[in-house]
Image (spheres, grey):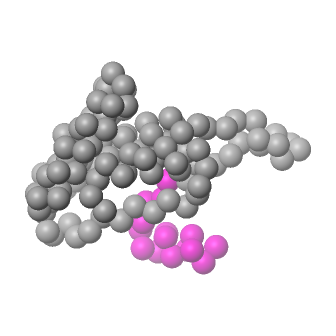
């Protein structure tokens, strides 16, 4: 709870993929790696739109939503290209470093981490 309180106090956006369970506590839905992959692509796309709305033009604006790509290879290519711009200092200095934290090690987290590895870190 102290961690959650600190997150709320600092106005940090936290995305949590929860397990759905029946009354016996057994999981009834499990998300796979592709859920993490698609979710991270959409997060990066949304980040580009949000930063643009705040007046920042960033390489993230060139990343589309996951459903716009024919396959993950196309999405990875777009993200890798955005990463090249970031590596060449094409991010506004005033937004500071972006920090992504993965709190799990399951399928969804693994899929999301595979996508984030396309960016310089």
| Residue positioned 70% across, 36% down in the render | 29
Q: Is residue 5 left or right of residue 85?
A: right
Task: Give percent across and percent down for residue 60.
Answer: 22, 47
Relative to 25, is 87 above or below? below
Magenta residues, start to end: 1-15
| Residue positioned 49% across, 53% down in the render | 15
- Location of the C terminus by quadrant is bottom left
| Residue positioned 27% across, 43% down in the render | 79
Closer to us: 59 or 3: 59
Task: Give percent across and percent down for residue 40.
Answer: 41, 45
- Location of the N terminus by quadrant is bottom right
**Residue 8 is covered by the magenta coloring:** yes
Total marks in image = 0
Q: Is residue 3 left or right of residue 83?
A: right
| Residue positioned 11% across, 62% down in the render | 89
Residue 55 seen in the current view: no
Task: Give percent across and percent down for residue 58.
Answer: 16, 52
Residue 7 seen in the current view: yes
Q: Is residue 68 left or right of residue 34?
A: left
**Residue 109 is covered by the magenta coloring:** no
Q: Is residue 22 left or right of residue 33?
A: right
What is the residue that sits farthest to the right in this orientation? 24
Relative to 57, is 29 above or below? above
């Amino acid at each position: 709870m102290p961690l959650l309180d600190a997150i709320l106090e600092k106005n940090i956006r936290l995305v949590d993929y929860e397990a759905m369970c029946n009354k016996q506590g057994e999981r009834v839905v499990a998300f796979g790696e592709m859920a993490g992959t698609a979710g991270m692509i959409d997060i990066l796309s949304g980040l580009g739109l949000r930063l643009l709305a705040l007046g920042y033009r960033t390489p993230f604006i060139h990343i589309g939503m996951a459903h716009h790509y024919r396959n993950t290879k196309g999405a990875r290519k777009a993200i890798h290209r955005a990463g090249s711009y970031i590596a060449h200092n094409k991010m506004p200095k005033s937004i500071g470093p972006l920090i992504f934290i993965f709190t799990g090690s399951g399928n969804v987290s693994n899929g999301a981490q595979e996508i984030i590895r396309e960016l310089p870190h």
